[in-house]
Amino acid sequence: MGNVVRRVLGIIREELDEDRAGESGESSESQMFNSAGTNSGLHRPARPLPKTAGQALTHETQALLGESNAPPTKTSMLSLLSHSPYGEVSHVAQVIAIPQSLLLQEGRSTGATNAADDLKSEVVEGIDELLDELRQADDQIATYALEQIHSREIILTNSTTRTTQKFLLKAASRRNLTVILVESFPNSHRSAYEILTGRPKGNSRSGEQMNRALTAAGVTVIFAADSIVFGLMTRVTKVILDANIIFGSGSSVTLVGSKLIARAAKLHRSPVLVLGGVYKISPDYPFNVNSLMENGEPSAEVSCMDDYLPGEIEVGKPLFDHIPADLVDLYITNVGSYAPATLYSVVNDHYRAEDTDLDSV
């Protein structure tokens, strides 16, 4: 949520900068025009007109030019336009410039309103583009599956999200795969055991839906417990994880149990690929990693009424793990693949420096 707020603030700031740049360009052009007009003699002081031109002007016009003592004469528009020598254009321009300046002053408020409406429409258009990016992020990430996964590979993952499912299905459309799905105790193990026993209870869970989709695509799916991940890693060719948060430093926050998998993969030299849209990449730096960790309700796993539990004991149920940058080989986003050390460039392209700390905005 914080990343999306920063993206929207960046869109507003970008449109404001473009609007100010356009206004400064227009003001500089108007100054150049005014200076050119002054040099050409359009704003020279009024001087007495020849007799022929004075007969062609009305009494009000002569008063504006400083010749109110001249007697009024009757004239027509045809005679006024017929007497226009080159030397008399400057005086006529002075007369016409007066109502134009008044019109410009009266139209300032209308121009400001139109500029605000234009700015609002541009910001709304930018937010619509951001929404399209969020909707298409999973499909765009899946397009890189064929570049990263080859035939007869054994993929290990503990994620049952839609991002991981689309990524594996895209690879399975051209490749022969075997997927090892870790149960991820204590968050997703129930659905894994229900599928293994063939007796799912209640509504279909994400793990069951993923298993059905992959098996329908011809993928061999194997469920495994967290305790045997280290032993299975000798046969695994790639590890795929789904990130909840990705930091510019190269670290990430993923589902609990991912750190165990990433450490085992590093020891066995198995590449670790982390999936995540650009909207998950955060400009924050995790100074305090423990502040990012969330705990769930442990009562579903351990009952508080159990007699064997001693008094005044705290039971935690972590939901996420923090994976350092040295345990990740590649991040796959909807705009390309990046090494952990190059994520700062993505942060600089999508966020403004003044929006990093939301408390100061």
Image (spheres, rainbow, N blue to C red):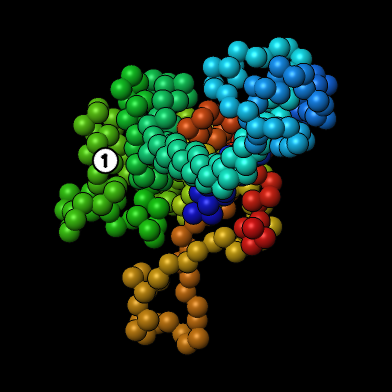
User: Residue 25's x, y, as percent?
Assistant: 69, 30
| Label total for image | 1
Is 7 situated left or right of 128 in this image? right
Q: Quadrant of the C terminus?
A: bottom right
User: Residue 147's x, y, as percent?
Assistant: 46, 21
Q: Which residue is mark 1?
A: 211
Q: Quick one: 216 or 224, which is closer to the camera? A: 216
Local secondary structure at mark 1: helix
Q: Quick one: 281 or 27, which is closer to the camera? A: 27
Q: Quadrant of residue 101?
A: top right
The answer to whether residue 21 is visible is no
Q: Quadrant of residue 341?
A: top right
User: What residue is at 26 percent from the left and 40 percent from the top?
Assistant: 211
User: Residue 254's x, y, as percent?
Assistant: 50, 50
The amino acid at mark 1 is Asn
The answer to whether residue 109 is visible is yes
User: What residue is at 24 percent from the left and 28 percent from the top?
Assistant: 217
Q: Quadrant of residue 263?
A: top right
Is 275 situated left or right of 65 in this image? left
User: Residue 295's x, y, as percent?
Assistant: 47, 66
